[in-house]
Amino acid sequence: MTDQTKGLLITFFGVLFVVPDSLFVRLIDADAWTIAFWRLLLAGGGTAVYLLLRSGTAPFRAVFVTGRFGAIYILGIGSSGILFVMAVSMTSVANVVFIIASLPIFAAVFSRIFLSEPFSQRTLLTMAAVVPGLAVIAYGSGETEGASLAGDLLAFALSAVFAAALTAARHARGTSMVPGVAMGYVLAALVVWPFSEPLSVPASQVPLVLAHGGFILISSVLLALGPRYITSAEVGLLVLLESVLAPLLAWVVIGEDPGVYALIGGGIVVGALLVSNIVVLRRRVGHKKQQT
């Protein structure tokens, strides 16, 4: 199996395991802070135990060696874990995942600011298409049942914070950031703990809580490993699957209608990013053919 095939399979399954994330938030009978606490503690603690049993403390020390970049990644990943649950609890699933899909735009901006990477013409054109799509989603929050502008703003913050974490990880690309996921989630769980009521979850809901944590654990590890073998464009194409499948899953299972504005705006955002990533892949394939 080639590295590319390995990376595609790892990332694909990572995306599949994260698709039900927002549905779990809807199904678990607990407040958002409590859901966030268990989601973060189970996923982060499980990842930490696995790494400690497999490799000891060495992977964690490696993240600390990266200095401020590792710290930014840990804080960004932890914060995004909290923001996701809060956003889903306040607005529609479709709005959250479509807004999160704009993450590459935030990443491009941060890369320009902090890594001095210039905007390509493709990036500028993608931004020009994505921004109106996000505006349509935000406008529709006042018209769609279950959606709210406050929740949309949290989703925007989530997208920006996660993009900052990924930008920091790119600066330390020689180091596996899986331990950073574990540390970020556990740290965030400790921050959330005073605001949550962990023991208030009904006994009938415990299997859902455990499944939620397990799904996020598996997804977090796979999505941290996959991009080490494939390009960011390939990762971007696969991650777009969540933007399509998560609202559909919520619609089928609990009847949550995404609303026409979310579908139109989300279609613009996902379509623009889809075209952008395909252009990158076509150029890369053409370049390889020229070299051979």
Image (spheres, rainbow, N blue to C red):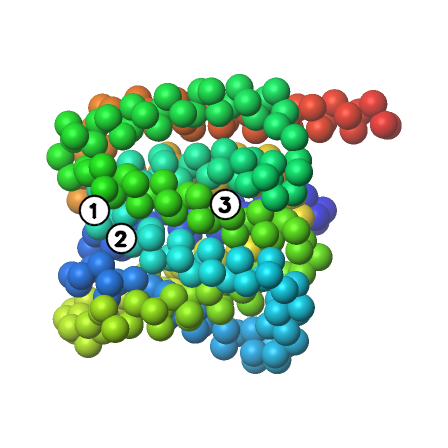
Circles 1 and 2 in contact, beta carbons < 8 Å: yes
253 displayed left or right of 241: left
* Amino acid type of the residue that numbered disc 1 sits on in the rendered structure: Met
Task: Look at the image and tell me in which quarter the C terminus lies.
Answer: top right
Q: Nearer the viewer, residue 195 or 232?
A: 195
259 displayed left or right of 20: left
> Which residue corresponds to the image point at 54% horizontal and 36% vertical from the top-left?
109
220 relative to 283, above or below: below
Secondary structure beneath dot 3 equals helix
Write down the residue under mark 3: 163
> Which residue corresponds to the image point at 44% horizontal and 34% vertical from the top-left?
102
Q: Nearer the viewer, residue 283 or 63?
A: 63
Circles 3 and 1 in contact, beta carbons < 8 Å: no
67 displayed left or right of 44: right
One can see residue 285 in this view: yes
Secondary structure beneath dot 2 equals helix
Circles 2 and 3 in contact, beta carbons < 8 Å: no
Estimate the x, y position of residue 256 in percent, counting from the top left: 18, 39
> Which residue corresponds to the image point at 32% horizontal and 25% vertical from the top-left?
135
> What separation in Å lies between label 3 and label 1 (alpha carbons)?
22 Å
Write down the residue under mark 2: 86
Residue that extends furthest to the right in the rendered view of this protein: 292
Where is residue 160, by image quadrant?
top left
58 displayed left or right of 77: right
> Which residue corresponds to the image point at 42% horizontal and 43% vertical from the top-left?
159
* Amino acid type of the residue that numbered disc 2 sits on in the rendered structure: Met
Dot 3 alpha-carbon crowd within 10 angstroms: few under 14, some 14 to 19, many 20 or more: many
* Amino acid type of the residue that numbered disc 3 sits on in the rendered structure: Ala
One can see residue 249 in this view: no
Residue 90: assigned label: 1
